[in-house]
Image: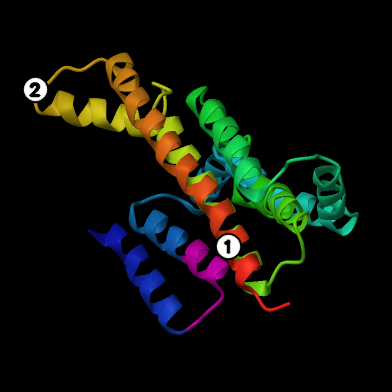
Amino acid sequence: MLTLLGVAVIVVGFALRFNPLLVVVAAALTAGLAAGMTPLEVLAAFGKAFNTNRYVTIAWLVLPAIGVLERCGLQERARMTIQRLRGASAGRILLAYLLLRQFTAALGLTNVAGQAQTVRPLVAPMAEAAAEGAGPLQDADRERIKAMSAATDNVGLFFGEDIFMAIGSILLIVGFLDQSGITVEPLHLSVWAIPSAIAAFLVHGARLLLFDRKLAERRAGAPA
């Protein structure tokens, strides 16, 4: 029970608004020493945990990398590319991205795209540029396009990843059913996720095409 002192250290440290990193380290030291570990053993545990989970911090490298690319004109280049395409619209661009997102997620490539690395620097600017091809956009319409871009990524990922049988959600369902005495193969769950993914694509795809129509209607009704 003495190891729970680490939790008390965290509660007190956060309540007093101390540095979060120092609070966590102090809590880990407290719990380790209370468990009978020597200071060197606690330090070794820190090193092992960092070495084992170092890949988790790699994701944070995406943020400064995207920031540098945006500073160098990534969004402007994306806009210029879309403006050269004839017949492109916000809904059609997002529909193509929805298909790509679902397909890659179904293969287990869930980190290939995402809100930070794809939607903000590429997809949303491309959708805005496609919509601007029919005339200037109002600020409210720009925000709607950004929101629809983010929603498209969420829908594609959520309904596409369950097709990949080694994804965490599928394994969680298999494990839970197995504890209840129900044996289900991961492949069976993945197969039955395909109709849901198709339905999600059709429903959200229709929403995107209707979104194009509403944008056109708002422009037609806007004062000159």
Q: Is residue 196 visible?
A: yes
Identify the residue at image location x=34%, y=58%.
34
Name the residue nearer the viewer: 116 or 18: 116
What is the tally of numbered marks visible in this picture?
A: 2
| Residue lying farthest to the left in this orientation | 181
Magenta highlight on residue 25: yes
Magenta highlight on residue 59: no
Quarter-wise, where is residue 203 in the image?
top left
Mark 1 residue type: Glu
Residues shaded magenta: 17-26
Residue 83 % position (x, y): 83, 47
Numbered disc 1: secondary structure: helix
Question: N-terminal of the two: label 2 or label 1?
Answer: 2
Viewer-nearest of labels 2 and 1?
A: 1
Numbered disc 2: secondary structure: loop
Q: Would you say the magenta stretch is mainly helix, strand or loop?
A: helix
Identify the residue at image location x=39%, y=31%.
197
| Residue lying farthest to the bottom in this orientation | 16
Residue 1 % position (x, y): 22, 58
> In this image, 30 relative to 187: left or right?
right
> In this image, 27 relative to 92: left or right?
left
Up-down relation of residue 214 to residue 164 (above or below): below
Identify the residue at image location x=45%, y=31%.
160
Indicate which disc residue 217 carries: 1
In the picture of the structure, the residue carrying the numbered disc 2 is: 181
Q: How is the image coloured?
A: rainbow
Identify the residue at image location x=76%, y=66%.
136
> In this image, 81 relative to 54: left or right?
right
Up-down relation of residue 94 to residue 104 (above or below): below
Indicate which disc residue 37 carries: none
